[in-house]
Amino acid sequence: MPVFASPSKARMITDQTSIHAASPKERVRLEALRSVALIEFIKGAIVLAAAISLYWLDPSDVTEAFLNFVHISPDHHFARLLFAFADRLSDIKEWQVIAGASCYSGLRFAESYGLWRARPWAEWIALVSGAIYLPIEIKLLAHRLSLFHASIFVVNVAIVLFMFYLRIYLPNKEKLRAARGE
């Protein structure tokens, strides 16, 4: 018996009945997916809010507040790059940044919706987008170990492993069982 219901069965559960009517294993899967959906929604909202704030705030002030929030020293190489970028922003470039951030946020919001509804396409987006960030996060950890960076890395690894489990491991396990006639 598979650990979790098939994606189509999980979709039926989220579409037609409440999460409380699902089996305990299906409920755990859906709760985990909804936790990831919440994280993705928060990421999208933060990026969108930061980009929109560029319309009313000075980009250098936004950069300084962001660096203080993530506890990165203004003397750090990454901080100097951000300040240089903020200084070069013109009105047109600000709108390009806002448009890019809006697209990123739109993707995060769509992914969040799909994960909330247990859609396989959203699980694939979460797997691929999370895996893309891992090398960058490893590089950041190698250069400067901080609780903030380590926390982000651990959460991202957990999300990638969970999505790998749902999208790759479980389907292959079910195929092997079917091939053996179990």
Image: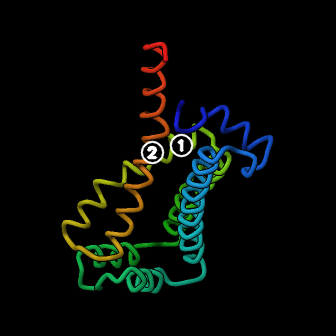
Tell me the quarter of the picture where residue 66 sits.
bottom left
- The CA span between labels 1 and 2 is 6 Å
Q: Nearer the viewer, residue 49 or 130?
A: 130
- Which of 152 and 52 lies nearest the eye of the viewer? 152
Q: Is residue 41 above or below residue 117?
A: below
Q: Residues within 10 Å of mark 1 (few under 14, many from 20)?
A: many
Residue 4's label in the rendered image is none
Label 1 secondary element: helix
Are the residues tagged 1 and 2 within 8 Å (C-beta)?
yes
Determine whether, in the image, residue 59 is placed left or right of residue 28. left
Q: Which residue is mark 1?
A: 123
Residue type beneath disc 1: Glu
Secondary structure at badge 2 equals helix
Name the residue carrying label 2.
127
State the colouring used for the structure image: rainbow
Q: Is 94 left or right of 77, judged from the image as shown?
A: right
- Residue 136, image x, y percentages: 30, 58
Residue 105 x %, y %: 57, 59
The quarter in which the N terminus is drawn is top right
On the image, the x and y values in percent for residue 151 come to 37, 69
Residue at image coords 50%, 64%: 97
- Residue at image x 60%, y 67%? 45
The x, y position of residue 50, in whole percent, is: 54, 74
- Identified at 39% across, 86% down, the residue is 68
Q: Is residue 15 left or right of residue 163?
A: right
Residue type at mark 2 is Leu
> Looking at the rendering, which quadrant does residue 112 occupy?
bottom right
Of residues 123 and 17, which is closer to you in this image?
A: 17
Please rate how many residues cluster around mark 2, counting C-alpha atoms within 10 Å: few if below 14, some from 14 to 19, many from 20: many
Q: Is residue 146 above or below residue 110?
A: below
106 and 37: which is toward the camera: 37
For the image, the number of numbered tags is 2
